[in-house]
């Protein structure tokens, strides 16, 4: 759907997409861009019970699954919590999660 049409039809969804684009811009290594590949990381689901990533968040926005900004923020926080729970502190993934968490303040969502 064209951005101008989306803005007219549903400004809330347009706002959420802009927030998501800002989050994606902070994910320089595209670590959070797609779901974790379970073939590459077969034990991921042993630690993470509810996976989350930026593409899943986009899908939820496009399918009107967020009723509030808080819903989007919960998924963002879940994504970061999953990253920090699974990865050890010495990894690039853990450091990326901390960096993303620290760069995204509450004002990003309001």
Image (cartoon, rainbow, N blue to C red):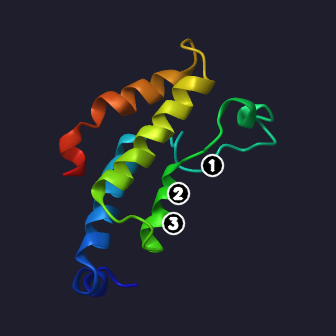
Q: Which mark is residue 55?
A: 2
Task: Classify mark 3: residues with Cα within 10 Å, few (<14), some (14-19) or many (20+).
Answer: few
Q: Which residue is mark 3?
A: 59
Q: Is residue 27 above or below residue 93?
A: below
Secondary structure type for disc 1:
loop
Instruction: Residue at 25%, 66% (x, y): give it.
Output: 15
Task: Measure the C-alpha gap from mark 2 to mark 3.
Answer: 6 Å
The answer to which image quadrant residue 90 occupies is top right
Q: Is residue 43 above or below residue 65?
A: above
Task: Measure the C-alpha gap from mark 3 to mark 1.
Answer: 12 Å
Instruction: Residue at 72%, 44% (x, y): give it.
Output: 37
Please provide percent x and percent y for residue 67: 35, 66
Q: Which residue is mark 1?
A: 35
Contact between marks 2 and 3 (CB within 8 A): the answer is: yes
Please provide percent x and percent y for residue 51: 61, 44
Task: Measure the C-alpha gap from mark 2 to mark 1.
Answer: 7 Å
Is residue 28 visible in this depiction of the protein?
Answer: no
The answer to which image quadrant residue 104 occupies is top left
Contact between marks 2 and 1 (CB within 8 A): the answer is: yes
Instruction: Residue at 55%, 31% (x, y): give it.
Output: 83
Mark 3 or mark 1, earlier in chain:
1
Secondary structure type for disc 2:
helix
Task: Classify mark 2: residues with Cα within 10 Å, few (<14), some (14-19) or many (20+).
Answer: some
The answer to which image quadrant residue 41 occupies is top right
Instruction: Residue at 42%, 67% (x, y): give it.
Output: 61
**Quadrant of the snapshot with the N terminus:** bottom left
């Amino acid at each position: 759907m064209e951005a101008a049409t989306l803005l007219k039809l549903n400004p809330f969804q347009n706002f959420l997409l802009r927030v998501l684009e800002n989050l994606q811009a902070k994910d320089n290594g595209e670590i959070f861009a797609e779901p974790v590949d379970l073939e590459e990381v077969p034990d991921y689901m042993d630690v993470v019970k509810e996976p989350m990533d930026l593409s899943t968040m986009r899908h939820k926005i496009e399918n009107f699954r967020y009723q509030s900004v808080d819903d989007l923020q919960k998924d963002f926080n879940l994504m970061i919590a999953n990253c920090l729970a699974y990865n050890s502190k010495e990894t690039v993934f853990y450091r990326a999660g901390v960096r993303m968490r620290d760069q995204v303040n509450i004002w990003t969502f309001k």
